[in-house]
Image: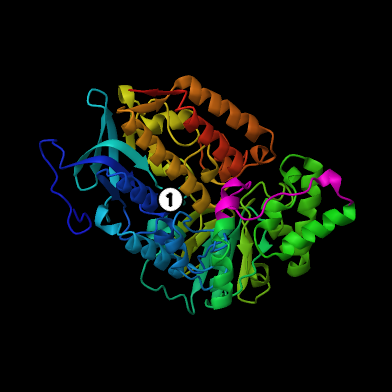
Amino acid sequence: MNAQASKPDSSASGQATRTLDALIIGAGVAGLYQLHQLRGQGLSVGAYDAAGGVGGTWYWNRYPGAKFDSESYIYQYLFSEKLYKGWQWSERFPGQPEIERWMNYVADELDLKKDIQFDTRIDSAHYDEQRQRWGVVTDTGELIDTQFLVTCCGMLSAPLTDMFPGQKEFKGEIFHTSRWPREPVDLAGKRVGVVGIGATGIQVIQTVADQVDQLKVFVRTPQYVLPMKNPSYGPQEVAKYQGRLAELRKTLPNTFAGFEYDFEDAWADLTPEQRLARLEDTHADGSLKLWLASFAEMFFDAAISEEVSEFVREKMRKRLVDPALCEMLIPSDYGFGTHRVPLETNYLEVYLRDNVEAIPVKDNPIERVVPEGIQTADGTIHELDVIILATGFDAGTGALTRIDIRGRDNRSLKEEWGKDIRTTMGLQIHGYPNLFTTAVPLAPSAALCNMATCLQQQTEWISNCIHYLRDKAHRVIEPLAETEEQWVQHHDETANATLISKTDSWYMGSNIPGKPRRMLSYCGGVGAYKTKCDEVASREYEGFSMQ
């Protein structure tokens, strides 16, 4: 069935208009590979996505300057040598248009689009205990009956768009970075305001500063930043990284964060001079290496954290020069690495331009949007033609809580996660049989991972689990309550030992009022997580109920 060509008619009688073995929500990095794997088992599989094409995050995030901050040659599927070597990246950290083309290359090479229904949002998914199947309803009223439900929605796919009173009254244009239009947006000669200076906001700011007449950046939480080195790739560079495929297959799933580099030496084993040399070397790499492969102790020891943080601050001071800008844009109340660390290209230098103004809003917050622009609490109105909201996401949980998911006894996932965010290894949830999840809380893929590495690992675990069930003539699998409790306790013990858990950020859900406080990502390391998942499978899913 070519699902993208036409949508089945909805059924007024409540009878299913389509029956599947497995339904996948999402057609991004996880969804495409999950579809390929389950279809390869001979299952009847359909994927649904609200977007008009494949790509997931790389379909929606087409804002100016959007690009990888994982090296292109590791943000790839590793299961097929032919697929890996059939694509050539143009640079170390390519931009969104090239990434979207790559996603379409994958979908076309694997002939996946015939089983994906685009422009279709999943509204609800209810588990029928008697039939042991899920009833899934789309925004068009289509009802799909499926045995397995696999969510591949992405961990940053529920944007915070309606942020301030008065947005609808603004006379200019408002754009959220994760819903940027496909058609070009002309910012030339305009007064532009950017709200948010996380990783996304930084990419936008450094890209548009020389295009606009005036740029006003509303600064609340300053960020530690690392300079990006982004060399172009020609035939020699491509041949070099493609020749490392076997090495990458072995290395990536077993490092701390799913990158090619990892922590090597302990802080205590090096002299002060050697430590500084390591910091300089990893900083000069022009990647996330300083964060993810310098010293793991920075995440646990406040004194070491301060020393590494001061190293990064000094690098930023030398570029910003202006003491007032340093005060506003360099963090001092949290440690390096306890927030998401952005890569940037001449971002700090943007604030030295005559047409750019940094407006502090931590103590004088944005109060509302007025027809003329943005009004802060002191009554000042900043007149603007365009407002760009780089205001983030309801990370990890938002993609699923925006769907009415109900498991056994009509329990609501939105209500349960509104009280306590729990999963079993980020792969299943007690009370929701045959629901498999990727990029949700309590797994590295919720934040601390090269996403391609972690999503491949999770989808392969799910595919193997479903194969095991079918091979053993089981129809249903669900984690026991005590299994989930053990994982939550292990997760919390691991998280609470870090400084990340003591810092307010979206990693802790702090950007969402009322969101239960728990570190979203498992921080025990990608390799350790993989080992634990493999152990569960090797013990024939001990701790899971099967029927």
Q: What is the quadrant of the C terminus in the image?
A: top left
Q: Is residue 76 magenta?
A: no
- Indicate the quadrant where residue 99 lies: bottom left
Give how far across and how far down residue 267 sits, in percent: 81, 46
Residue 277's place in the image compared with 395, above or below, is below
Label 1 is placed on what type of residue? Ser
Relative to 32, 522 lies left or right = right
Residue at 30 percent across and 48 percent down: it is: 39
Q: Nearer the viewer, residue 311 or 33?
A: 33
**Residue 218 falls in image quadrant:** bottom right
Query: Looking at this view, is 47 or 159 the one in front?
Result: 47
Q: Is residue 247 left or right of residue 134?
A: right
Task: Give the residues in magenta.
Answer: 248-271
Residue 68's spot in the image, x, y percent? 53, 62
Whether residue 266 is in magenta: the answer is: yes
Location of mark 1 (residue): 157
In the displayed structure image, the side of residue 184 where residue 248 appears, left or right = right
Secondary structure type for disc 1: loop
Question: Which quarter of the figure has residue 341?
Answer: bottom right
Q: Is residue 114 left or right of residue 497?
A: left
Report if residue 269 is visible in the image. Answer: yes
| Whether residue 448 is situated above or below residue 329 in the rendered picture | above
Q: Is 255 or 83 nearer to us in this picture?
A: 83
